[in-house]
Amino acid sequence: MGSTTVTGANNETITLTYQSADNTALAQQLAAQINNAVAGGNVLPVDYNGSPLPPAPPNQTLEVVDKASGPLALPSDATAVVNVATDAVITGSGAPDAQVLSGNGNMRFATNGGSGTVVTGDGNNFIVQQGLGGWNIHTGAGDDTVVANYGPNTVAAGGGTNDIKLLGGSNLVYSTGTDAILAAAGSTTVDAGSGSNIDHVLGVNASITFIGGTGPATVTGAEGSVTEFGGAGGGEFRGGAAGSNFIEGGSGATTIFGG
């Protein structure tokens, strides 16, 4: 377990904890960016307790510290949000390169366009990527849902039981939990790594590349195509109807069906 600190309103120091080393390192990177921007006078930290937020001063943007459970629509001049609420429902500002840090509470976050990075703790989170901008989404050990509509996205949904839906664009998924992954369109690479438990990957009209890990996997190409490199976990792999399938079994027990 690791932690990071970020500057809040009135020089408050906010501490967030994360189970995984990767999430800790990424959260520390985002916190350093926010802290430097606050120290340089480019970002103003403000608390959200349910009352309307103030506008950003000239030549500044806002870091919003969400302390109130329930809905929050970020204003267009907000470029960073730090969630410490128990059950947050946040709509993004649509800003480019946005920074979103969340602790161990539950968070529902819709990007509302824009681009940026989301790092959460071990709550149960629901993240929706909207628009064409790319997002880097890292969640913790809770049971998470991530929906990516388009854009080049990276998703690492942590060690829980996760539901990942990829509706288009070019996506990279690091699977370390028990994950159900739907790739509806576009191209998707799934790296199951050494920490994955069970993966179920379904491609509809997508091109899928799957790199197997230590857990068993089921990969179905449907109307798309599949490139698969099996791992120690083995599994069942079905090529897609679009053809151009390449399936290589790993060291685990593997069943292969052509497209």
Image: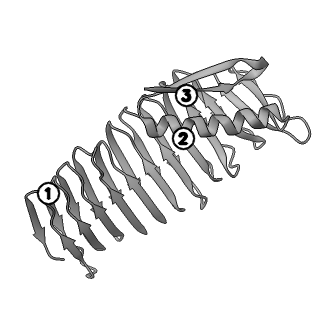
Q: Is residue 251 left or right of residue 45?
A: left
| Secondary-structure class at tag 1 | strand
Residue 241 falls in image quadrant: bottom left
Quarter that holds the N terminus: top left
> Is the Cβ of the residue at disc 1 closer than 8 Å to that at disc 3?
no
Q: Which mark is residue 88?
A: 3
Residue flagged by tag 2: what amino acid is it? Leu
Crowd band around label 3 with a 10 angstrom C-alpha radius: few (<14), some (14–19), many (20+): many
On screen, residue 194 above or below 258: above
Residue drawn at x 7%, y 58% as measured from the top left:
253
Give the distance between the C-alpha atoms of the residues marked 2 and 1, in whole angstroms. 32 Å
Instruction: Kindly identify which residue carries mark 1.
Output: 235
Residue flagged by tag 3: what amino acid is it? Ala
| Secondary-structure class at tag 3 | strand
Q: Earlier in the sequence, mark 2 or mark 1?
A: 2
Marks 1 and 3: which is nearer the front?
A: 1
Q: Earlier in the sequence, mark 1 or mark 3?
A: 3
Residue drawn at x 11%, y 69% as measured from the top left:
256
Q: Residue furthest right?
A: 58
Q: Front-most of 220 and 63?
A: 63
Crowd band around label 2 with a 10 angstrom C-alpha radius: few (<14), some (14–19), many (20+): some
Residue flagged by tag 1: what amino acid is it? Gly
Tell how many labels: 3
Q: Where residue 29 sits: x, y (%)?
A: 60, 40
Q: Which mark is residue 26?
A: 2
Q: Earlier in the sequence, mark 2 or mark 3?
A: 2
